Amino acid sequence: MENIYGLTQQNLEKYFVDNGDKKFKATQVYEWLYKKRIHDFSEMRNVSKSTIENLSKVFAIKKLEIIDKREDVDVVKYLFRLEDNNKIEAVLMNHDYGNSICISTQVGCNMGCHFCESGRLKKVRNLEAYEMVVQLLQVEEDLNIRISHVVLMGIGEPFDNYDNVIKFLEIINNNKGIDIGSRHITISTCGLVPKIEQFADYDKQVNLAISLHAPNNEIRNQIMEINKAYPLEKLILAIKKYIAKTNRRVTFEYIMLKDINDSRACAKELSELLRGINCYVNLIPYNETSHIEFKKSSKDTILEFYDELKKNQVNVTIRREFGSKVNAACGQLRSNYKED
Ligand code: SAH
């Protein structure tokens, strides 16, 4: 049976209209699901018995099973079991500006970035929209909190699951439902150029982050397979077009990898590459993992890199480190729990 959390309000309106019913019932159902957070159709008190009966024949209201939960300072990491037994993770971060959730979009990942734990399991499948919605609902319910920010930076490449991700955005952004403001949502991509071009035409003001990680093709080819398909000149051109169309600022994520991309010369080259682009750079201290040989840059190196970018008028921040003790940090999420 189809999970109702995967339906946009328009999908639900269509269902009602197709069944000779009134469109406005979709709004009522949406409010029961997302404002009042009921767990069963029978709790929808202002909806007629026959409507409820029909709904429950076609749709299920089902959550996922939380099979593990680990806490660190300001972080909780969840492991979910999907209905087909695959596993994914989501991470809740408590910032001073609110609660932010990091959502997974696929089981495994095919992008093959050499430094990232998530890609050690190749993509098994895309997540359905409801599987992304439910990550958010269940974390809210479990911690009895409201989430204000969503980042699509968990396991998977969001733009390799484009349609379901857009559906997810529609569902969580709807003000009759979960109502996360589009400016509070960030999609991160390793650089799927055709999808960046497509996303430029998306009508919501969702933030776009690009996992850049290198100032030139030579280094990027060494660490990110995607660069062989979409080298920097194509990526940068797509981003310039995106900015011209949307008038939005993009974020470049840049992991600091010891002796790979962290020299002062790299910082200079990066400043050149980004010159004139409306962006800011988020420097990410690398989280080491036991399976991957890369090392993190020292604090001093990161600060020097930061200073060099500043000197060249690049907007830059250093990402706060979160959750590395419970393997909840960037690049440490994974689907394959069998081996440790
Ligand atoms: N596939 C998308 C979404 C994942 S976002 C993307 O690549 O953007 C996860 C972010 O964490 C990416 O910027 C990724 O490059 C980064 N990351 C991966 N491994 C990491 C690690 N070990 N330490 C810090 N950041 C890492």
Image (cartoon, helix red, strand yellow):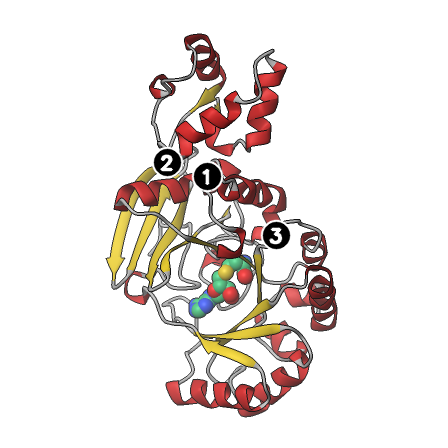
The answer to the question of whether label 1 and label 3 lie on touching residues, with beta carbons closer than 8 A, is no
Q: Which residue lies furthest to the top in this view?
A: 50
Q: Which of marks 2 and 3 is nearer the N terminus?
A: 2
Frontmost residue, 129 versus 311: 311
Residue 191 position, x and y percent, is 64, 62
The answer to the question of whether label 2 and label 3 lie on touching residues, with beta carbons closer than 8 A, is no
- Report the number of numbered marks: 3
Residue marked by disc 3 = 159
| Residue at image location 32% in from the left, 54% down from the top | 77
Q: Is residue 78 left or right of residue 3?
A: left
Residue 118 position, x and y percent, is 46, 57
Any part of residue 125 in sight:
no
| Residue at image location 65% in from the left, 78% down from the top | 274
Q: Distance between the residues labelled 1 and 3?
A: 16 Å
- Mark 3 crowdedness (10 Å alpha carbons): few <14, some 14-19, many ≥20: many
The answer to the question of whether label 2 and label 1 lie on touching residues, with beta carbons closer than 8 A, is yes
Instruction: Choose top left, top right, bottom left or bottom right for residue 111.
Output: bottom right
Residue marked by disc 1 = 131
Q: Distance between the residues labelled 2 and 1?
A: 8 Å
| Residue at image location 56% in from the left, 74% down from the top | 280
Residue marked by disc 2 = 64
- Mark 2 crowdedness (10 Å alpha carbons): few <14, some 14-19, many ≥20: some
What residue type is disc 3 on? Phe
What residue type is disc 2 on? Leu
